[in-house]
Image (cartoon, rainbow, N blue to C red):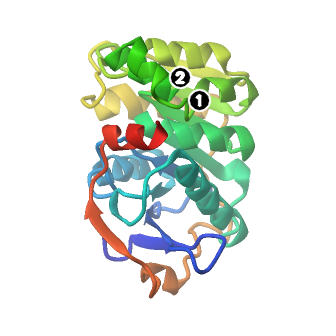
Amino acid sequence: FAGELVWIPREHPEDTAIPCLLLQAPAGSSKVLMYFHGNAEDLCLTYELVDMLREYLNVHVVAVEYPGYGIHFGKPSAERIIADADSVFDYLVNEMEVRPRDVIVFGRSIGSGPATWLARYRSPCCLVLMSAYTSIRAVVKNIAGRLAQMLVADRFKNIDHMPYISCATFIVHGQKDTLIPFSHSQKLHEECSGPCSLHLPKEMDHNDLDYYEDLLEPLHRFLESCGISVEPLPGKEFLPVPSHLFQPPENQALLNSKGRLNKLLQKYS
């Protein structure tokens, strides 16, 4: 990822930095899409999708890695993932001069947790949820039953955030998803306070989808219907990226492994 992998600093300099993919829109754009990937992915595996989002929507993309995934050293926890999401959002606004109303937040599966949190507390222009859940505990109940549900702490309670989200919200969930039933997204849609569209492709499951028909085209139409323009501002077509972000800090520990949902659930229990 030469020229595309950046290391976003946290609030405290002694902390390790957050590895992110930063893909600039070739023609320039006024919008930045923050992407939070699914559980069985890392930045490498998510590249194809975020590159298509960049090209099709003409937006800059910043894909955020989770602790314990890919090259991001650390232990995955809901609190750490939320803190990292907050740090990257702050860096975009404070250092790259991106207006909060020019940020689109996209969360896929486990990534719907930090995305929904940002949509509630940071006021982006749009929230996109793909294969989302109402809460981690509810997912465990669907997979392993009520007893397992009671053994898992209730983290990433997306359903509790939805009544406070007023930005434009697009939700897509496959009707053939057997890991997280699409009824989760139906409930999130019902609770959302802002303009919200629910798209339920019949042939899409949790991992397999037609990127264009199931996601890109309907999302593009939704953004247009909400009047969300990607036309770049004069003189601000591209994100200003300091050169030092392309090198990991000297104290940065690196990891080469990919997280799994059971690891996250162990941390949450």
> Foreground residue, 227 or 149?
149
Residue 172: assigned label: none
Q: Residue at x 39, y 66 (%)?
A: 73
Residue 148: image location, x then y, percent: 39, 21
Residue 157, picture quadrant: top right
Q: Is residue 181 visible in this depiction of the protein?
A: no
Badge 2 amino acid: Thr
On the picture, is 171 further left or further right than 55?
right
**Which residue is labeled 1 in the image?**
157
Q: Secondary structure at mark 1?
A: loop
Residue that carries the numbered disc 2 in the rendered image: 134
Q: Is residue 109 left or right of residue 157?
A: left
Q: Does residue 206 appear left or right of residue 110 in this picture?
A: left
Q: Position of residue 83 (x, y in %)?
A: 61, 55
Query: From the viewer's perspective, is 111 left or right of 169?
Result: left
For the point 30% across and 47% down, which residue is it?
41
Q: Of the residues under marks 2 and 1, which one precedes in the sequence?
A: 2
Whole-number angstrom distance, CA of label 2 to CA of label 1 = 6 Å
Which quadrant of the figure has residue 109? top left
